[in-house]
Amino acid sequence: MTWTVDQPGVTLAAFVKARAEVPNSVAKKHVSSGKVFVDGARVTTIDHRLTTGQQVELRVNAPKPFDPEREGVLVYDDAHVVVIDKPTDVNSVPYEDEKSGTAMDLIRGAWRRQGKAATSVPLHVVHRIDRATSGLLMFAKTKQAELGLAAQLRSHAMERMYRCVAHGAVTSRRIESYLVPDRGDGMRGSTSRLDQGKRAITHVTADRPLRHATLCSVRLETGKTHQIRIHLSEAGHPLVGETVYVRDYEEAGGKLLTSGRLMLHAATLGFEHPITGARVSLTSELPPDFLAVVQRLE
């Protein structure tokens, strides 16, 4: 369906509602889902103002536009290894209560857009990053690659650097502790019982002071569950956007800064290719929602 605009200043959603004779909610969904084109160009802003003479076309069967901030981008992909720049609020792998919408699904979706057979290629888990953490996440596509990458993780040969924003004036330091699933109050954390915990080492570099916070680079020497979040929280500097490891900080009178996301991003991933031996070094720029919080705190 194509129409010519005969009244300037009308919003795109209102124009589609009137011409297609659909409810306002349906018209807004048509626009926001990428099914409306103005002079041949897709427009997804519902309050976009039209001018006289423009051509508006509704293509109800148009595919949904690709959104890298929600669907991620494949930054490396060969016959053995694939790395995705994972958005925040996406699980790395399926869990019992959420079997779809994971990073693995995003990878297969990217393959389908490329015209590849998305379901015939196995994805072997090499490492994980938290649902709330954005950034570089790797999977092996062959068993041989999985074994080779897992060996690099065990020997601490894999390079993993994160960027984060933590409360307070953070100083550069090396943090080492032994982590347990329950430190005695139902939360993961450090223990003094070395025979019970798993050794975890985190290297923190304070990059830039912000208002009541610090932008940091963090290098993982080991990779335990929630390691960065726990270590910085126990040091008195929970991450901005943290919702779990904040009890001690709040009980000590700390005031939490607001953020729409956990301020933790997997920015660097380096490894030796498990088949060719070539060095692979990948980086991910800080996403817009992360940068917006940093700019607000500057």
Image (cartoon, rainbow, N blue to C red):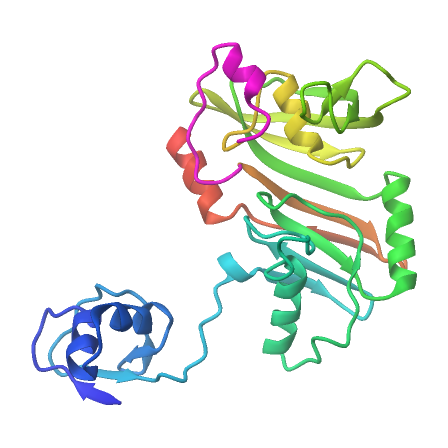
Q: Position of residue 274 (x, y in %)?
A: 89, 58
The residues colored magenta run 243-262
Residue 55's place in the image compared with 153, above or below, is: below
Is residue 25 visible from the viewing direction of this image? yes
| Residue at x 55%, y 23% (from the top left corner) | 246
Residue 281 in the figure: left or right of residue 277? left
Q: Position of residue 113 (x, y in %)?
A: 59, 77
Residue 279's place in the image compared with 77, above or below, is: above
Residue 16 in the figure: left or right of residue 296? left
Which image quadrant for residue 144?
Answer: bottom right
Front residue of 297/255: it is 255
- Is residue 257 on the magenta stretch? yes
- Is residue 161 on the magenta stretch? no
| Residue at x 26%, y 89% (from the top left corner) | 1
Quarter the C terminus occupies: top left
Residue 39 in the figure: left or right of residue 283? left
Residue 157's place in the image compared with 235, above or below, is: below
Q: Position of residue 214 (x, y in %)?
A: 52, 25
Front residue of 257/207: it is 257
Is residue 275 visible from the viewing direction of this image? no
Residue 222's place in the image compared with 100, above or below, is: above
| Residue at x 21%, y 69% (from the top left corner) | 24
Which image quadrant for residue 79?
Answer: bottom right
Report the predominant secondary structure element of the magenta stretch.
loop
Front residue of 153/187: it is 187
| Residue at x 77%, y 77% (from the top left corner) | 120
